[in-house]
Amino acid sequence: MIRHRRTAGAAAALALGAVVTAVFGFAAPASAHVTVNPREATQGGYGRLAFRVPNESDTASTTKLEVFLPENAPLGSVSTMPVPGWTVAVEKRQVDPPVQVHGSEITEVVSKITWTAGADSAIAPGTFQEFPVSMGPLPAVDQMVFKALQTYSDGAVVRWIDEPQSGGEDLAAPAPVLNLVAAAADAPSPSPADSPAPADAPAAAAEEGGSGLAIGLGVAGLVAGLGGLVLGGLAFVRTRRDGDQPARGDATATTS
C-alpha cells in the first residue's frame, strides 16, 4: 500500500510539471550568458580580455559570436588572438574627436568583432569557448558595455544586449560588462607590452628548470654525504669488533 501511494505521488508530480511546462511554455531558465573576463581592469592601461561563450542549447551548437565595442568609449588599439577553427572579421568606424594614443591621433577605431566557426569547430551543447582580445588604452569611464549576439546552428540568435540598471535589477539577457577602476597616482605610463604575453612562458619555464636542477644537485650531494657516513660507521664498527677479539695464537697458548 505504501509503495502504491509513493508511485501515485510521483506520477502526480510529473503530471503537474508537464502542465506547468505546457501552460507557461518553458522549464527552468538558463543562467549562463556571454561574459568578459576578467571583469575589472585599470583605466588608461592595456587589458588582455576574453569573451566567454557558453552554449545553452540542448540540441544546437553556437556558430557565430558578434561583439560590439561601446561607441562612448573608443579604443585606439584592438587586436585579436587566433582561435583554432574560427575566422575573425573586424569592422571599423570613424571617430571625431580622434583618440589620443601616446601622442598620436587615431581617427579610425574598431567597432565590431565577429567570430565564425568552421565546419567542425562550433561550440557544442554543454561546452564553452573563449575569444581573447587585447585592447587599450582603456578609457576613463566606470564601465564598458560590450553588446553581443550569439548565433546557433538552428538559426536562433540570442541578443545579449541588456545594459546594467542603477537599481541592480536582474536582466533577462545581460550584456558583457567590464568595470574600470582609476590607476594609482604613481603608476607608470601604460603600453601594449604591459599586458600578459605568451612569450614570457619560456623564460619562466627556463627559470623554473634552473631552480629544479640546483635542487636536484643539492639532494644528490646530501644523499652522497649520508652514504659516506653510513660506510664510515660500518668500517668503525668492524674495526672495534676485530680489535676486541683475541688473536688465534694467544688463545692456543693459554689453553696449554
Image (cartoon, rainbow, N blue to C red):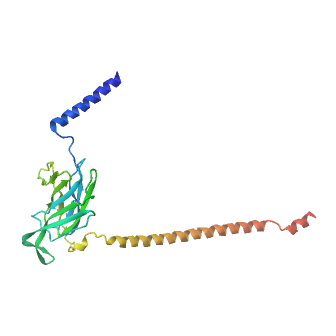
**In-front residue for pair 252/207:** 207
- What residue is at 19 percent from the left and 50 percent from the top? 154
Q: Is residue 104 left or right of residue 41?
A: left
Quadrant of the rendered structure where residue 40 is? Answer: bottom left
Residue 51 shows in this picture? yes
Location of the N terminus (image quadrant) = top left
Of all residues, the one furthest to the bottom in this rendering is 103
Residue 238 in the image, given as x and y percentages of width and height: 72, 67
Location of the C terminus (image quadrant) = bottom right
**In-front residue for pair 27/46:** 27
Of all residues, the one furthest to the left in this rendering is 96
Residue 127 in the image, given as x and y percentages of width and height: 28, 53
**In-front residue for pair 5/123:** 123
Residue 139 shows in this picture? no
Residue 184 in the image, given as x and y percentages of width and height: 20, 68
Residue 240 in the image, given as x and y percentages of width and height: 74, 67
- What residue is at 22 percent from the left and 64 percent from the top? 87
- What residue is at 40 percent from the left and 73 percent from the top? 206
Quadrant of the rendered structure where residue 123 is? Answer: bottom left
Of all residues, the one furthest to the top in this rendering is 1
Q: Is residue 41 left or right of residue 246?
A: left
- What residue is at 58 percent from the left and 70 percent from the top? 224
Quadrant of the rendered structure where residue 194 is? Answer: bottom left
Q: Is residue 197 left or right of residue 223?
A: left
Of all residues, the one furthest to the right in this rendering is 256
